Amino acid sequence: MGNRETQINRLVRLLQTALRASDFFLDYKVYSIINPASGTIARAGRLKRVLDNAEKSFIAVEKSKLKLAAHVSSDITEPVKLARMISQRSEENVLILSCGGDGTHNMVVNGIMQAEEKKRQNVVLMRVPLGSGNDAADAPDFLSALNKLATSNSIGKIPLYAMKGAKDRTFRYGCNIISFGIDAYISLVTNRVKPYLPGDTYKLIADMSTLFYHKIHPQAELGINLEKQITRDEYLLVAIGASGSRTYGNGKRILPDTNNICAVKNCSLADRLKLKKKIYAGEHIKETGVYSASARHITIDYDRLLPVQEDGEAWWLSKDDFPVEIKIISDVISVLA
């Protein structure tokens, strides 16, 4: 435990050094939300290697005495609570550094969205890639994130998707991809075993699921209702992005073009193996059995149990959770550009 605490202290010092190298944050209060359960942070050896590389390669001249208020979450839901608390009480400009993987960033986004709209206008988010999956981060790796903090001088906006099941009172939000079917099942299993298995756990589980998912969880007809069209079939996978041109599972190009919806029909084992390789390369859109479209309001209908994943966090939906409503919201969260 002490070793991990030492590495987290090093992480905070590096982030603060990068922030002090920029004049851009002088009028900001800056907070970090660090999830110690995230893939990279949870493994002290991996985190040490990331920080060693950053300390060796990152060079910055401090221009200010800016202080970073660091919060280390103590349970799985605390990033939501911390982000909501920080956002809700903000009367001035606030920068939140979300330190973890896609699941952590998802929780922080949901916390920000739970604050009053007026308060949210003061909040800027930076998603620092320190998870086992970093597809939704604002930089490709930790060193790049430090350089971005040290040199950034502008703010942009990102879209979100909002999801609500039939029994939900409020929407859940995400900033990358929500999906149903085999890939959600892969996320479920991966999240259970990744603390115990080294390497690319997602790819290993994906390879196994391609062979056995249809036997473990037989498909039924699923409906995808868009603004002007409805399609129904036995879909093995349905992925919906906050926009097109998105990856998940550490770089798997499920949405390789501007369309934000991809659905893959159930097919033979030979075709599944062929499609898996093409999905990894982003070359599947024109294949037989693949449906691609773009929409801002989508309804998913199903009459049995189905796994769903939201930015890497997965769970099971019962038939009573359907229909599921998904809508795309533009320019909601401010991020470092």
Image (tube, helix red, strand yellow):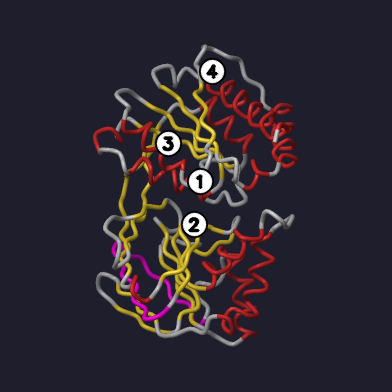
Secondary structure type for disc 2 = strand
**In front of the other: label 4 or label 3?**
3
Give the image location of residue 137, x and y in percent: 52, 44
Pointers 3 and 2 in contact (CB under 8 A)? no
Secondary structure type for disc 1 = helix
Residue annotated with mark 1: 104
Specify whether residue 294 is painted magenta.
yes
Relative to residue 326, is residue 37 depicted above or below?
Answer: above
State the quadrant of the N terminus.
top right
Image: magenta residue range: 288-304
**In front of the other: label 2 or label 4?**
4
Relative to residue 204, is residue 32 depicted above or below?
Answer: above
Residue type marked 4: Arg
Q: Which numbered disc flags the more N-terminal residue, 4 or 3?
A: 4
For the residues marked 2 and 4, what is the alpha-carbon distance in whole angstroms? 32 Å
Residue type marked 3: Leu
Q: Which numbered disc flags the more N-terminal residue, 2 or 4?
A: 4
Q: Relative to residue 39, is residue 267 drawn left or right?
A: left
Q: Which numbered disc flags the more N-terminal residue, 3 or 2?
A: 3
Q: Which mark is residue 20?
A: 4
